[in-house]
Image (cartoon, rainbow, N blue to C red):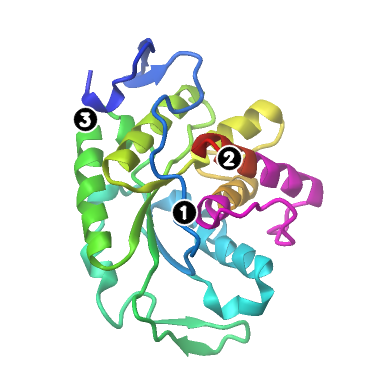
């Protein structure tokens, strides 16, 4: 069994070539990094795949939630995504994403005016996600481990903090949840990086309200509700602030949005042990 999946007192089984933990929906390893500190990030780059860009992009929803929480500082929040459909960590040239006068050098305000961003550094954080199976695939998990370190080192060298986005299980493969959580937590600890427990929030929401559909018809990508839940988890993890009561609902009905906000906050608090 690969080092990545070493867990004390836990029996593993294998289904369809993917190691899974029987009856477990959480990481066995505890995260060492549980906060980004008192000065939460104002700018972020999201490096990943279609899980980020569905439903008009998770980073856009995050910016709107951040602005709703701090209406006096709307221009302070900027999130950019660089995504390739189906991509893993190794598909991305992370070094190039931080080159001057390129990604993130300008944006658009609420009136569609071009705003040239003059910053000491392009991004405070880089939120990175591997492909949906890569961290637990027997032929790809070593690539995940190698590039988690390589990309974290690049991000730190550019003055930003690396953050890993723990993805969710497929709708028809809930047994993916625990090994994905474990893989991302181990990688986060190895690279002194915060891990965002989106996958655990999906599992918790499904356990509490299984009739709420968090998935697109392909059972992998997020529905709008899934993207909103992930956004709430990202907001809570990066800022340390609760999304509960946020006025930004992304077009979702208020009771559903409130449910997802609470699930996100509970998941983050439990995962970080707070």
The vertical placement of 229 against 161, above or below, is: above
Decide whether residue 236 is among the magenta residues.
yes
Q: Classify mark 1: residues with Cα within 10 Å, few (<14), some (14-19) or many (20+).
A: many
Q: Is residue 185 left or right of residue 108?
A: left
| Residue, disc 1 | 52
Measured as percent of width and height from the top left, residue 256 is found at 75, 45
Q: What is the number of the mark on residue 269? A: 2
Q: Please give left or right for residue 125 compared with residue 247 in the image.
A: left
Crowding at mark 3 (Cα within 10 Å: few <14, some 14-19, many 20+): few
Mark 2 packing: few (<14 Cα in 10 Å), some, or many (20+)? some
Give the mark nearest the N terminus, 3 or 1: 1
Does the magenta portion include 179?
no
The residue sitting at 71% across, 50% down in the picture is 244
Q: Which-is-in-front pick, marks 2 and 1?
A: 2
Instruction: State the image coordinates of residue 262 (x, y, percent, origin top left).
Output: 69, 43
For discs 2 and 3, the disc positioned in front in the rendered view = 2
Q: How far separated are the C-alphas under marks 2 and 3?
A: 33 Å
Q: CA distance from mark 2 to mark 1?
A: 23 Å
């Amino acid at each position: 069994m690969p080092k990545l999946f070493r867990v004390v007192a836990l029996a593993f089984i294998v289904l369809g070539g993917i190691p899974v933990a029987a009856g477990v929906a959480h990481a066995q390893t505890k995260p060492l990094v549980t906060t980004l500190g008192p000065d939460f990030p104002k700018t972020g780059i999201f490096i990943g795949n279609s899980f980020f860009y569905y439903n008009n992009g998770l980073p856009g929803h995050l910016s709107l939630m951040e602005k709703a929480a701090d209406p006096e500082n709307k221009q302070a929040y900027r999130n950019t995504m660089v995504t390739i459909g189906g991509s893993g960590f190794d598909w991305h040239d992370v070094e190039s994403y931080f080159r001057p006068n390129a990604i993130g050098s300008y944006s658009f305000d609420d009136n569609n005016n071009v705003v040239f961003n003059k910053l000491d550094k392009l991004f405070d954080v880089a939120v990175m996600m591997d492909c949906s199976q890569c961290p637990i695939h027997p032929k790809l998990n070593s690539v995940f481990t190698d590039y988690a370190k390589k990309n974290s080192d690049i991000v730190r060298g550019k003055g930003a903090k690396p953050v890993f986005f723990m993805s969710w299980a497929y709708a028809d493969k809930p047994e993916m949840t625990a090994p994905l959580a474990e893989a991302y937590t181990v990688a986060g600890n190895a690279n002194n990086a915060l891990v965002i427990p989106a996958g655990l929030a999906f599992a918790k929401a499904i356990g509490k309200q299984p009739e709420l559909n968090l998935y697109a018809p392909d059972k992998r990508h997020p529905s709008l509700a899934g993207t909103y839940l992930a956004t709430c988890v990202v907001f809570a993890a990066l800022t340390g602030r609760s999304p509960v009561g946020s006025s930004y609902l992304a077009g979702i009905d208020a009771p559903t949005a409130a449910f997802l906000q609470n699930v996100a906050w509970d998941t983050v608090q439990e995962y970080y042990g707070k």
